[in-house]
Amino acid sequence: MKVQTRYTSNYTSIAANNQQNQTKQTKKQSNPSFGSGLATFASMLETGGFLTEFLCVDFLGMAGPRTVQGYGRNYDKTGKINYQAGTEELIRELLSGPAYFFVPLGIIAGAAKLNGKCARVDNSVMDAFEPMMKKANTGSNNAAAIKGNFIDSFMKEAFGDYKDTSLIFKKKKNDAPRTIGSAKNNIEKIIQDVASGKQKPKAVFKEAEECLTALNKVNGKNLDNTNLVELLKEAVEDGKGNKIIKGKTFPIKSLVYDIPNYLDDFTKKAKKETTIGDKFIEAFHKTKKNIRNASTILAVAALCAFLTIIPRLYQVDKSHNPAHNGLDIKNYKGKKESEKAGGGVNENK
């Protein structure tokens, strides 16, 4: 009995130690190291686009240091944080840097709210969607049928001549890997999900990028940037008398956002028609492109108007300069005047 008890006790102790080690390992994995933090930051810069890169550089190189300098102004003389100077500096930096992007984005968002989501879609993308919609059109105004036919048309245009492949994908770092049987089918499912509202584009575009990268590598396409999709394909000569299929390239990330916006807008307009023909499709695209052009002009005008206001934010209020907070300016000025009257300070003393 004692032997059995000792054995059971030892076994329990070993199991407890294993559980503790597993817990420590889990905690270690859940707390990223400094190195992994830098890797995550670098990945964010790489995938976030120009806006993310600009904001990081502007904050780390300009806005951040200037704001810190403002809060610390005259601290060596007063021993207090200069909240007014720092806050004013922060406001000016936030308005003069990020607003270069947020003003145009605000105009486009307003246009999309008033005139439909196609205001967010670039005209070059609209040009690529128009022939695909004509090929997909069956005359029906049913939203589900329009979306399904268009996605089929898109897949044929983009990947009709592609050899399929499979890959292993992990949504998050600690997720168990899963094998995707068909990269093509997975991209199609992603587009179907965002078009129907089952998924948000932000949650699935990275998976679409990984599938497209695998497809491009297998097929030897866009190897300098494997996140690009070719549309508007046509046969062109390569200069040696050979005909090759060439098209205009679009990032899969933008398409994952643009396709649901485009289809949502198109189906709402088509719902009011009894039959959908080429003339309706052409008129729809022409109207939406004109709205996009008008929004762009308005965004540029708004930004120019904003830029005329920014310099005034940098003008110092003569009645009170926060840089002088905590300083005895009157005595300081009086001391300077007395030094000038006496011929200045002898620095050799």
Image (tube, rainbow, N blue to C red):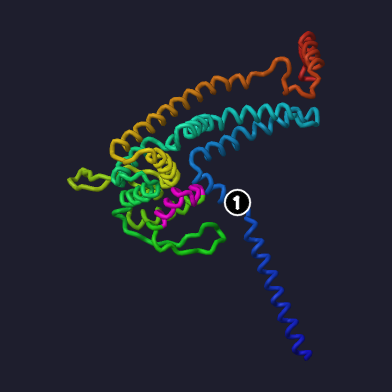
Furthest residue in direction left, as rendered: 241
Q: Is residue 270 left or right of residue 50?
A: left
Q: Secondary structure at mark 1?
A: helix
User: What's the magenta bit mostly, secondary-structure-wise?
Assistant: helix
Q: Position of residue 222 (x, y in %)?
A: 35, 49
* Residue 193 vertical position relative to residue 345 in the rendered view, above or below: below
**Quarter of the image that includes the C terminus:** top right
Marker count (numbered) = 1
Question: Residue 335 or 72: which is nearer the viewer?
Answer: 72
Query: Does 171 lie within the magenta span?
Result: no
* Residue 7 vertical position relative to residue 238 in the rendered view, above or below: below
Q: Position of residue 8 (x, y in %)?
A: 73, 84
**Quarter of the image that includes the N terminus:** bottom right
Q: Is residue 268 left or right of residue 177?
A: left
* Residue 15 vertical position relative to residue 179 in the rendered view, above or below: below
Q: Position of residue 290 (x, y in %)?
A: 38, 29
Q: Is residue 280 left or right of residue 87?
A: left
Amino acid at pointer 1: Gly
Q: Give the residue at mark 1.
A: 37
